[in-house]
Amino acid sequence: MLEVERAAPAAALAELKAYLRIEDSLEDALLAGWLRAATETAEVELGQFLLEREVVEEGRVCGGLLRLTHGPVRLVLELREMGTGVLPVGRYALDGAARLRVSAVADGVLLAARYRAGMADGWNRLPEMLRQAVVRLAAHFHGHRDSPEAPAMPLAVRQLLRAQRARRLR
């Protein structure tokens, strides 16, 4: 089971409209959809959530670790052993960007984790290169919305995302 709160970067709408030189609100719902799609595309490319949101997922302990599928984890809200109850905070600790070190829990035990993950807690706290990548990708989706072929991601967007990925690996 995996539940992810889907957050639309509402604060980005004004930036996208300025980039596209749109002054009215007739296409706001469409543009918000393109922003969500662009954000999710960037997250897939980077392997991380851009904007912080809540995730609930289940997983099995292996080697004293519970690997989480989304990162970077900012806060563990609750860790529950299925059928037993909530684990005390002292029985687990964050070990890296997306895994928990769990003590006194046998391998193979099913746990449910509720946590908050993401690079930033708001649009304006994202690195500028990521904000630009999302806005430009959303504009690209908007500009090619009636194209019969799925156009490739623009090179400028790829370079912005690649630069962020390289920064993260250092």
Image (cartoon, rainbow, N blue to C red):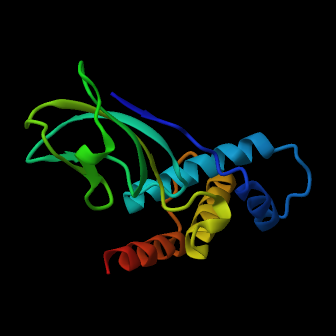
Q: Quarter-wise, where is residue 108 in the image?
A: top left
Confirm whether residue 68 shows in the render.
no
Q: Give the vertical position of 155 relative to 148 (above or below).
A: below
Q: Give the vertical position of 59 relative to 27 (above or below).
A: above
Horizontal arrangement in the rendering, residue 157 relative to residue 135 (left or right): left
Toward the top, the furthest residue is 83
Which quadrant would the C terminus be assigned to in this image?
bottom left
Q: Give the vertical position of 3 relative to 158 (above or below).
A: above
- On the image, the x and y values in percent for residue 12 come to 71, 58
Q: Residue at x 56, y 47 (%)?
A: 37
- On the image, the x and y values in percent for residue 168 come to 37, 74
Toward the right, the furthest residue is 24
Horizontal arrangement in the rendering, residue 139 relative to residue 77 (left or right): right
Q: Give the vertical position of 169 relative to 59 (above or below).
A: below
Instruction: Name the residue nearer the viewer: 108 or 35.
Output: 108
Which quadrant would the N terminus be assigned to in this image?
top left
Number of numbered markers: 0
Horizontal arrangement in the rendering, residue 95 relative to residue 30 (left or right): left
Q: Residue at x 61, y 74 (%)?
A: 128
Horizontal arrangement in the rendering, residue 1 relative to residue 161 (left or right): left
Instruction: Name the residue nearer the viewer: 24 or 69.
Output: 69
Confirm whether residue 163 shows in the render.
yes
- On the image, the x and y values in percent for residue 69 come to 31, 46
Instruction: Name the residue nearer the viewer: 30 or 166.
Output: 166
Q: Residue at x 34, y 34 (%)?
A: 57
Q: Quarter-wise, where is residue 106 in the image?
A: top left
- On the image, the x and y values in percent for residue 15 come to 76, 63
Q: Residue at x 45, y 74 (%)?
A: 164
